[in-house]
Amino acid sequence: MDLSLGRHQCSCASSFQAQAFSERGRVCPLRAKLRIYTISDQDDTGAWIRNTFPDLFYISSIHAWNQYGLAAWTGIAGDNYYGFDQGGPDFTKLTKEWLKEHVQIGPLGSAYPDYLFIPEGDTPTFLYLIQNGLGVPERPELGSWGGRYNKTDISPHGLGSNHYSDATDHVVGKDGKTYKSNHATIWRWRDAFQNDFAARIQWTLSPELSSANHHPVISVNGSVGTAPIYFTAEASTSITLDAGGTYDPDGDSLTFKWWQYREPTASQWWVTAEVQEMKIEKQDEEGRVVKVTLPTPEECCADLISRAPVAKGQELHLILEVTDSGTPALTSYRRIVIQATNKELKGSKVIRDAIGDALP
């Protein structure tokens, strides 16, 4: 059960309060099924919920009171209002002019109000639920239109907290510069999710299927759907990925973009040093088929600190983006997860004292 809470933690806390004493410290079957994503802590009920029920799956940005510009969710549209990542995000599809032309139309869209602070402030909680092949609901650390969040406590001891909070992504902005921020985990997808919004409004204007655009349907190695595709491969070896069966329901032409999402692999802040790039080679003109070569054992199958070889290495993430030529252009995704292995423990046997001694 997914609960997307914009500013209603108080209501959620009230529903839990009846069980606060009888269930405190115990694993409750109902709580085990809940997945909560809130827009920061709007009052002290969020902290109460997490402290009382640390086992509860709970996504929330944590920061000082009323300092919402620090929260990842403001990456949805807050760059102008809060002033972060200036030059990186493109605000074009959030202007009141764009919204008036593409969103505030028809029987439903006309009810969409002009924004006062930032538009769609609570929407990341909804975007997290959209199954478009990018996000995995049970793993917020993998990233989605709703942002990317890591556990605040990974220790198996103590509270055993199941709270997820802001992580960061490296993203090249519209100015060509690289930005590293929690906000970027959301604004990096802005063009795609705003086009998606505009398309959904178009769906409300006519009962005719042909009157609006629809998302491409991705097939990779014969697998159609939105769930990740998992592979296990030895370091330095290659696998072939074939999206030849991908099609557009409206008959639009398609563009294919394969890229490595390095941040979900990393265990710490220094992503570019810890996670090396896979080699992605197009095997046809369109890019429907690619050959992917894993990094060397030293790069993807070594202990982070000592650099000693390990048999089970990094979990590497490859994203396929397929965008159609319709209006508005719509994008679908497929995540390929590759578990790197090193069965013969190849690689350097030199033991290092610190990560900085071994990483570039």
Image (cartoon, rainbow, N blue to C red):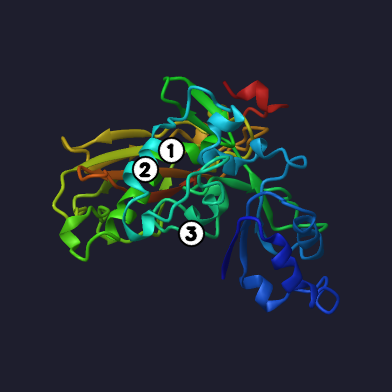
- The numbered mark, 2 or 3, whose residue comes first in the sequence reads 2
Secondary-structure class at tag 1 = helix
- Can I make out residue 198 in this image? yes
Q: Position of residue 44 (x, y in %)?
A: 80, 55
Label 2 vs label 1, nearer the camera: 2
Q: Is residue 309 left or right of residue 339?
A: right
136 to the left or right of 310: left
Q: What label sits on residue 100 in the rendered view?
A: 2
For this rendering, which residue is in front, 340 or 44? 44
| Residues at discs 2 and 3 in contact (Cβ within 8 Å) | no
The secondary element bearing badge 3 is classed as: loop
The disc, 1 or 3, on the residue closer to the chain's N-terminal end is 1
Residue 196's spot in the image, x, y percent? 35, 49
Q: Reply above or below: 122 against 69.
A: below
Q: Residue at x 67, y 32 (%)?
A: 306
Asked if residue 220 shows in the view, the reply is no
Query: What is the distance, in whole Å, between disc 1 and disc 3 at their CAs?
Result: 21 Å
* Spot occupied by residue 89 in the image (x, y as percentages of width and height): 47, 30
- Picture quarter containing residue 148? top right
Which disc number belongs to residue 94? 1
The residue type indicated by label 3 comes to Leu
**Residue bearing the label numbered 3:** 129
Residue at 47% of width from left, 43% of height from top? 316
Using the numbered discs, state the Cα–Cα distance from disc 2 to disc 1 in whole angstroms. 10 Å
Q: Is residue 273 left or right of residue 70?
A: left
Q: In this view, does 74 lie to the left or right of 295?
A: right
> Which amino acid does the dot numbered 2 rest on?
Lys
Judged from the image, the secondary structure of the residue bearing numbered disc 2 is: helix
Whichever of labels 2 and 1 marks the residue nearer the N terminus, that label is: 1
Amino acid identity at mark 1: Leu
Label 2 crowd bin: few (<14), some (14–19), many (20+), radius 10 Å: some
